[in-house]
Every structure is written in C-alpha cells, then in structure tokens.
Amino acid sequence: MNLESGAGLLHRLTSYVPDRDWDQRPDDPRLRHDLVQNDPATQPPQLKTYPNGLPAVALPRDFADPGVPATAVLAGATCPAQPLDAAQLGRVLFLGAGIVRTSERRGRPYLFRASGSAGARFPLEIYASTRGVAGIPDGVHWYDAAGHALIQLAPAASGAVTTLIVTGVPWRTGWRYAERGWRHLYWDAGTLLSQLHAAVASAGSAPRLRSLFPDAAVRQLVGADGIHEYPLAMLSFGDGAPAIGATGTAARGNLPPVELPLCTDAQRAGEREELGEPWPDGPRLPEVPASPSLDEVVRRRGSQRLMDRSRTLPRNLLEWPMAAAMRGIDVPHWVAVHGVDGLVPGIYRWPDLSKPLRSADLRDELLRICLDQYLAADAAYVAISAAPLSALDDRSYRDAQLAAGLVEGRLHLAAYALGASATGMTFLDSEVPALLGEPDNLAALLFTCVGVPEYASRPSGGPGAPVKIGSIVPRLG
Ligand SMILES: Cc1cc2nc3c(=O)[nH]c(=O)nc-3n(C[C@H](O)[C@H](O)[C@H](O)COP(=O)(O)O)c2cc1C
C-alpha cells in the first residue's frame, strides 16, 4: 500500500502514537489544522434534513418480532420467510439505525441509534432503493430515523432487488476525530451492517453485502456529493441484480459544508466502476446455543461502560461468539485473553486456542495501548483485527476496516445474546505489532472488548419511543 497517497497516507497520518495525545495531530499540511476538534460551536447536527415537500411514507411502528434466536441468525440458520412489506423493511431499518435511546449532552438532546458508533458520532445514513416492497412505492428513499419514515428522493432505480445503501458523513465523526474519522465510517458501517444483515436474515431473506460497486453511479443514485457524504457499502434483499441504476436525479439533503480533503482523497482513491460479488456467507455453525430473539438482543445491547475484572467468562463465550463473528471473514484476528476459564492469559491467533503465542497477564499492556481506557483491561478478552499494509490497496483497505467493524458488531450481538457484554475500542496504532509479535507494517484495524457486565443496559424503546438514559462514565487510567 502506498503510504504517500490515498488511504495509505490517511492511515499513516492518522495513526496514534504514545508520545502524542489522540487529539494532537502531526504537523502535516494535508491535515486540516484550522478546525478545533469537539468545538460546541461547530457541532454538526446528528441527522440529515431534506427540503419539505418530498413524498414520505410513514413506516408502521408496531412490527412483529419474528422470534428467531439471535444465535440462530448469527450461526447462519435458515429462518422462516416473512413477507417483505413496509413493516418488515421498517423493522430492518430500525434494528440497524433506529433511534433507541436519548440522553442530554451540554444541555442538548442526544440521540443513540440501534447499533454502536465510535464516540457516539453516528455518522451514517441509510437509503432504501425499493423493488416490490408491499406498501412502499418503488423508488429511492432516505430513512428518516426520527420519524421512522421513508422520504422518496428519486424514481425507481433499474435492477431487480431491494437494496440498502449505507453512506458516511465524514464531518459528523471528523468533528471529534478529525481525519481519523474516515476509518470510523467503515468501522461504524460494519457494526451497522452486522445488525442490518442479521435483521434481513431473520426475516427469511438472503442478505447480500457488497463493498465493491460503481461509486460514482451510487453517489448519483442517492444524491451524495462525494465530499460531504459518500457510499460505503450496500446490502440487498436476496439474490438478483441490486436496484442501483439511477433513472432520475435524486433530491439532495442538507449537510454542513465542511470538507476534510485528506478523507475526500482517500475515498476517491478507492473508487471503482464495477459491481463486485457479494461477501461470502461462511459456513453455518453446527451448534446454536439458546438465546433471546434477535430483536430482543438488539434492544438490550449497548456498549458496556464498566466490566467486572474479578469475574471470568466460560471458554464457550469466547469460542462461539468469535466463530459466529468470523463467518466468511478473512481479515486476521488475534485474541488477548485476560480472564477466560480454561485458557492461559496471553495472545492467541484466532482460531488457534491450543496454545498462546505469548502467555502473559496483559491487562496493563492493554490499558496502555487502549489509551488508558480500563474496559480493555477489565474485559475477559479483547478481539483484535489487523492486516499487513502490504496486502492492501486503496479499496481493500476500506474492506478490511469494514470487515473489522462487522466482526465487532457480530461479537457484540453474540456476547449480549449469551449474557456477556461488549464494547468497541480504539488503540495506539504504533504499539499493536509488538503486542501481537508481528512486523511493524501490520495495520491495526479495530479492538472489541468482551467481558462480564457490571450493570445491565436499559432495553431500548421502539420506533418513536426512545428510552431516556443517564450517562455511565467508563474508568480511565
Ligand atoms: C467502532 C467502535 C469503536 C468504539 N471505540 C470505543 C472506545 O475506544 N472507547 C469506548 O469507551 N467506547 C467505544 N465505543 C463505544 C461507543 O462509544 C458507543 O457505541 C457509543 O457511545 C454509542 O453507545 P451504544 O453503543 O451504547 O449505543 C466504540 C464503538 C464502536 C462501534
């Protein structure tokens, strides 16, 4: 990977090192130095808006839970087919991006969505290009999470099957994380897609995830300008040609006009013109432990803020969630084990748990590498995704970040389904190769902490009924 341009340059310039605070950046003119991170005066709105007058369809707020155990969905079991109608499409969108909780930050209401997001920035949008969904006109629609509604932006696209397009708004996460936020778009898209994918599968449809698509055409389809918003991935309901061929001009929404040029360049460098194959499903897992339904698990999930380091997890709460999370994924993963019954603490290269690569109590090391965040030390284990930069290019770098996010999201669901808890976690890039005993050109992608919860998250509300939450502050070193 070329570290002087595109995604490689962004990776290099946004890597965290120990002698610089996370919000201090290298003195390089390609980074924007005129923006103050976390400045309340420039905080972007959490939601996109559109001019009034576009056709809207309210999605039903009462939808049936198909009752499929979360573990069955994650294991790849075939689920009974449900009709694809407005309620079902609304259910899928809600289980990925619905507004489930609210809190207050600096005197303003703050919205939390159904899937996690680094720093709760929620920088993603979802569009549904519909084909034959009962109760919804064929067309290109934006998911209005606040209203649990679809706003039609453009006429029906060419193509056969209903397809969700996930886009990222770089400034929404860049406001806090500057150019590193571009990586977060893909992490967050992975966690969101883990839930959308599971929701589609639980309705008996075959979810088809694609990360290779004609970027310019898909930008045109959803009205994204490629600077303030760009498409990241798409998910189709079943086999068949995704409905992504624009047949008209899409209405454009309102976003703050703040550009991070390094992010624009990284995104552009990976743009391609062809439509790729869907990601592989991976083999089904033979064992399906009992769990609540997927809908129930999504409503109960939250990122655990406090984990109990005095308690361990049984080995099957590492083996099963990791196996489920890694279905069809070829990005390398390691596991740092702190407290798992029957496993010597240390670093393991998934899936080999027979013997650690290094046996050690790694709690202090993880605390340091994860910027003094105790969750990484208090967890029972920490899954770590990383890939050699030499194996990546401007496009596959995106895929690797997306895969890491997908694993994070699935691990999260599996952990909550089985009574454990989880949170995504960031890290000092420069320290990860030595932790794993790998060469320096290994790019760390994402950490996921899984452990024993110190408290239970309050289950979320349904559409239009988010639950109010207070804030629980994680321990910092
Ligand atoms: C990719 C990713 C990275 C995250 N990194 C951290 C982290 O470094 N530290 C932390 O305390 N939480 C982290 N989180 C958790 C988020 O803060 C959390 O998802 C967000 O506040 C929304 O809350 P919820 O997940 O409970 O809905 C991460 C989440 C994701 C999805």
Image (cartoon, rainbow, N blue to C red):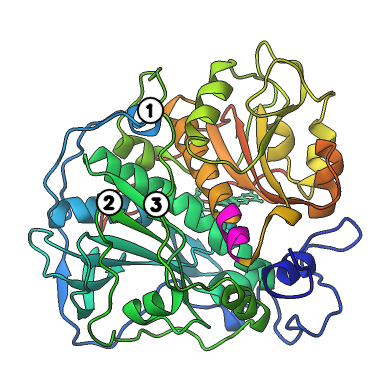
Instruction: Measuring from the top left, give residue 46's x and y in whole percent.
Output: 45, 71
Q: For this view, does 248 lie left or right of residue 270? A: left
Disc 3 marks a residue whose amino acid type is Pro
Q: Residue at x 22, y 67 (%)?
A: 159
Query: Residue at left 70%, top 48%?
Result: 387
| Front residue of this view, candidates 155 and 153 | 155
Reply above or below: 220 against 233.
below
The Cα–Cα distance between marks 2 and 3, rounded to whole angstroms, is 19 Å
Q: Please determine whether, in this image, residue 243 is positioned above or below residue 293.
A: below
| Amino acid carrying mark 1 in the image | Thr
Residue 327 tag number: none
Indicate the amino acid at tag 2: Val
Relative horizontal placement of residue 217, taking residue 161 as reference (left or right) = right
362 lies left or right of 451 = right
Q: Main secondary structure of the magenta part?
A: helix
| Res 39 visible | yes
Mark 1 / mark 2, whichever is N-terminal:
1
Q: CA distance from mark 1 to mark 2?
A: 17 Å
Residue shown at 34%/50% (left/top)? 208
Q: Which residue position is annotated with label 3?
A: 278
Q: Is mark 1 within 8 Å of ligand 1?
A: no
| Mark seen at residue 71 | 1
- State yes or no: Cβ of the residue under disc 3 lies below 8 Å from any atom of ligand 1: no
Q: Where residue 276 sits: x, y (%)?
A: 42, 59
Q: Position of residue 27 (x, y in %)?
A: 86, 79
Rendering quarter of residue 248: bottom left
Nearer-N-terminus badge (1/3): 1
Magenta stretch bounds: 395-400
Q: Nearer the viewer, mark 2 or mark 3?
A: 3
Identify the residue position indicated by label 2 in the image.
Answer: 92
The quadrant holding residue 77 is: top left
Residue 477 visible: no
